[in-house]
Image (cartoon, coloured by chain):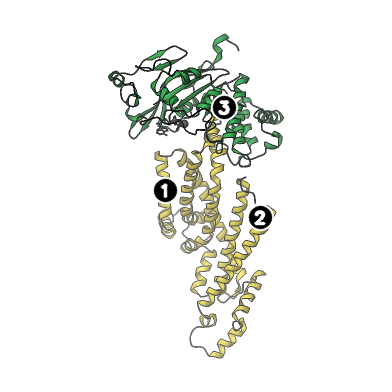
């Protein structure tokens, strides 16, 4: 286990380093920051001065390592647009994004897993058909469309929930539902199919032959085995919830990292874009690490 | 036992019928099966693939696969009670306690995510209400009884840490843990290699000789039947077509199907995985003819065979369903 942790941690670091190279390269390929930031006809001396001020005249490799070294200490540079450290901007926006992702994840777990389990147990019955239809719809409907429909019905017409902004629990519900729809669909389908596989297995027959109650068969034996693939997909979906919130945050004017990213891209505020992407990459890597550790807890066949 | 000579019968199956609703009609994989099983004996059930052996076993356990499969008639009497008439709850109390089962696939019949100690504890907890030290001791004793070396250390093992033969022993220990009256073993050796098979057969021999449980042994392997069983039932198309003492079935089979099976046997001691095939195809259970289901493949067939179901002939000890049985001798 100890060795596994070291290896996985090293892999994670390498992954994040690769991401920093790509981020850095992409933001530089997309144009000269100095020209982007000071639009219009500007004297060359003004541009050079600007480049010298921000270190943009150093060799690209030097710039990269400076970026990396600073990033390692939490310094992601200054936002040109807000005149504020990027790390500060990220930290300010993080709670809103985390709150939204956590709410969407909670909805996913609470709705999708029971729905998938029930669909598998009652395979081929109307309950199963309903669950599968819901899953199909959830997977097909784009988040922005669902978000707009929800706003139209529950905010504009019924006035139950606020249409935008972060003003407590009621304002969280509509964006969280819009954000979770896709994950609910994916996790429902996977839970159903994993449960069907497991319920068909010999050890489930044997569990019944021992005289176990149906509840013990389903929850102790079947769900525990089915949870191994489910955890993988939940991890993946959590990553998507964190990054997929771009669209939903925009629609609901939610003050999170997703909206920060959109604004930064349109304003060519490249240090902020770098910071957001780096944050996303680190979140993904950490989630994957967490999933791997959970595996070892859930499946005794996996011993690192 | 309590009530005299009758109590020697631990399982009495009477005219059992099980039906499967399928797209192509109703299939009757168990169609009027009757037999008794005595304490301390191993009763063999042999027959071609698809003849209804597993369905018979699963019907007795009432663990039929899905709502489209149902017991539609007959009785399964265990300890004076008809299992067919029990509620689901009552039936759960019988499973693993009075009637236990060993499945065909030792490699997959243990739950991979729980230790074997955990899994062995389950039936003892539910049926015998054991807890703590007493429970632990029973688990270890159970493993020792099936010759698992170093049982104290093994209880913490997970299935993947054990060989196929070991796992089959664990499953057997689990089935015997609550001292059932009836043990049903559906092809317990098929998935194992020859040396391990021999060990498992020896284990069943020991279980038999302890004399506390009656074993229903479903197998393709006549060698194992010869070694373990006193009596054997031959199944064809959902019915028992012949039943009698093992020597008579081998040396003087009366049903033409039994005779064809026995004749096609390899020399004793040779390993076979499947029951040797005889010419012709097993009948389509969804469209059985009105008469004898074996008629199309039978060398002795007459018009009567095709029209009327054959009667039960012979004695209580050795009976068969045939209009034109083989004459005694070979
Ligand atoms: N789930 C099912 N749905 C429809 N028909 C089934 C189902 N399970 C079994 N059958 C049919 O029931 C019949 C009896 O099957 P069973 O499994 O009892 O045979 P068996 O004698 O155990 O064969 P084998 O030696 O291959 O294990 C077969 O003809 C099979 O086609
Ligand atoms: Mg079978």
Screen quadrant of the C terminus of chain B: top left
Q: CA distance from mark 3 to mark 1?
A: 40 Å
Secondary structure beneath label 3: loop
Quarter of the view holding residue B154: top right
Give coordinates of residue A58: x percent, y percent: 61, 83
Q: Which residue is mark 3?
A: B96
Q: Is residue B14 visible?
A: no
Viewer-nearest residue: A58 or B284: B284
Q: Residue at x 72, y 30 (%)?
A: B133
Q: Residue at x 59, y 53 (%)?
A: A291
Crowdedness of circle 2 by 10 Å Cα count: few (<14), some, many (20+)?
Answer: few
Quarter of the view holding residue B115: top right
Mark 3, ligand 2, within 8 Å: the answer is: no
Mark positioned earlier in the residue sequence (1 or 2) = 2
Secondary structure beneath label 2: helix
Question: Bounds of the magenta span?
Answer: B322-330
Q: Residue at x 59, y 64 (%)?
A: A15
Q: Which residue is mark 2?
A: A4
Q: Which residue is mark 1?
A: A134
Secondary structure beneath label 1: helix
Q: Is residue A297 above or below residue B9?
A: below
Query: Chain letter of disc 1?
Result: A
Q: CA distance from mark 2 to mark 3?
A: 41 Å
């Amino acid at each position: 286990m100890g060795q596994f942790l070291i290896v996985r941690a090293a892999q994670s670091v390498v992954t994040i380093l690769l991401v920093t190279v790509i981020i850095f390269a992409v933001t530089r390929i997309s144009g000269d920051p100095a020209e982007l930031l000071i639009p219009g006809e500007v004297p060359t001396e003004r541009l050079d001065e600007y480049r010298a001020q921000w270190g943009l005249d150093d060799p690209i490799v030097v710039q990269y390592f400076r970026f990396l070294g600073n990033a390692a200490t939490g310094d992601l540079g200054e936002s040109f647009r807000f005149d504020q450290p990027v790390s500060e901007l990220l930290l300010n926006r993080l709670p809103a994004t985390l709150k939204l992702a956590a709410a969407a994840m909670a909805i996913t777990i609470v709705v999708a897993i029971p729905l998938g389990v029930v669909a598998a147990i009652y395979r081929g019955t109307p309950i199963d058909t309903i669950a599968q239809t819901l899953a199909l719809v959830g997977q097909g409907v784009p988040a922005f469309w669902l978000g707009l429909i929800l706003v139209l019905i529950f905010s504009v017409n019924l006035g139950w929930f606020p249409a935008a902004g972060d003003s407590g629990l009621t304002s969280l519900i509509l964006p969280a539902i819009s954000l979770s729809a896709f994950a609910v669909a994916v996790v429902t389908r996977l839970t159903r199919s994993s449960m069907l596989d497991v319920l068909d297995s010999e050890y489930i027959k044997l569990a019944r032959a021992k005289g176990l109650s149906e509840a013990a068969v389903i929850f102790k034996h079947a769900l525990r085995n089915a949870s191994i693939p489910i955890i993988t997909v939940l991890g993946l979906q959590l990553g998507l919830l964190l990054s997929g919130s771009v669209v939903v945050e925009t629609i609901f004017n939610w003050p999170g990292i997703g909206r920060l990213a959109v604004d930064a891209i349109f304003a060519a505020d490249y240090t902020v874009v770098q910071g957001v992407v780096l944050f996303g990459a680190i979140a993904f890597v950490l989630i994957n690490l967490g999933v791997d550790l959970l595996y070892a807890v859930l499946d005794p066949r996996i011993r690192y | 036992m309590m009530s005299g000579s009758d109590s020697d019968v631990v399982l009495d199956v009477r005219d059992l019928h099980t039906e499967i609703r399928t797209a192509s009609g109703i299939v009757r994989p168990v169609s009027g099966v009757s037999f008794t099983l005595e304490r301390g004996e191993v009763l063999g059930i042999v027959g071609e693939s698809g003849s209804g052996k597993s369905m018979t076993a699963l019907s007795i356990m009432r663990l039929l696969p899905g709502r489209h499969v149902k017991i539609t008639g007959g009785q399964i009497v265990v300890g004076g009670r008809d299992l067919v008439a029990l509620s689901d709850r009552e039936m759960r109390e019988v499973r693993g306690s009075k009637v236990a089962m060993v499945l065909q696939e030792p490699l997959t019949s243990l739950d991979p995510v729980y230790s074997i100690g955990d899994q062995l504890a389950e039936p003892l907890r539910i049926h015998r209400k054991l807890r703590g030290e007493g429970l632990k001791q029973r688990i270890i004793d159970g493993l020792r009884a099936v010759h698992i070396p170093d049982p104290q250390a093994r209880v913490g093992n997970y299935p993947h840490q054990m060989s196929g033969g070991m796992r089959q022993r664990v499953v057997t220990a689990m089935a015997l843990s609550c001292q059932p009256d009836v043990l049903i073993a559906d092809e317990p050796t098929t998935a194992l290699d020859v040396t391990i098979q021999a060990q498992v057969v020896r284990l069943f021999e020991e279980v038999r000789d302890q004399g506390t449980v009656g074993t229903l042994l479903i197998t393709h392997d006549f060698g194992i039947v010869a070694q373990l069983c006193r009596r054997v039932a031959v199944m064809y198309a959902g019915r028992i077509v012949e039943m009698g003492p093992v020597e008579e079935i081998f040396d003087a089979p009366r049903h033409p199907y039994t005779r064809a099976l026995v004749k096609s046997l390899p020399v004793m001691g040779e390993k076979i995985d499947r029951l040797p095939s005889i010419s012709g195809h097993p009948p389509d259970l969804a469209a059985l003819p009105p008469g004898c289901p074996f008629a199309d493949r039978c060398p002795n067939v007459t018009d009567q065979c095709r029209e009327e179901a054959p009667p039960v002939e012979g004695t209580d000890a050795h009976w068969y369903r045939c209009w034109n049985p083989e004459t005694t001798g070979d």
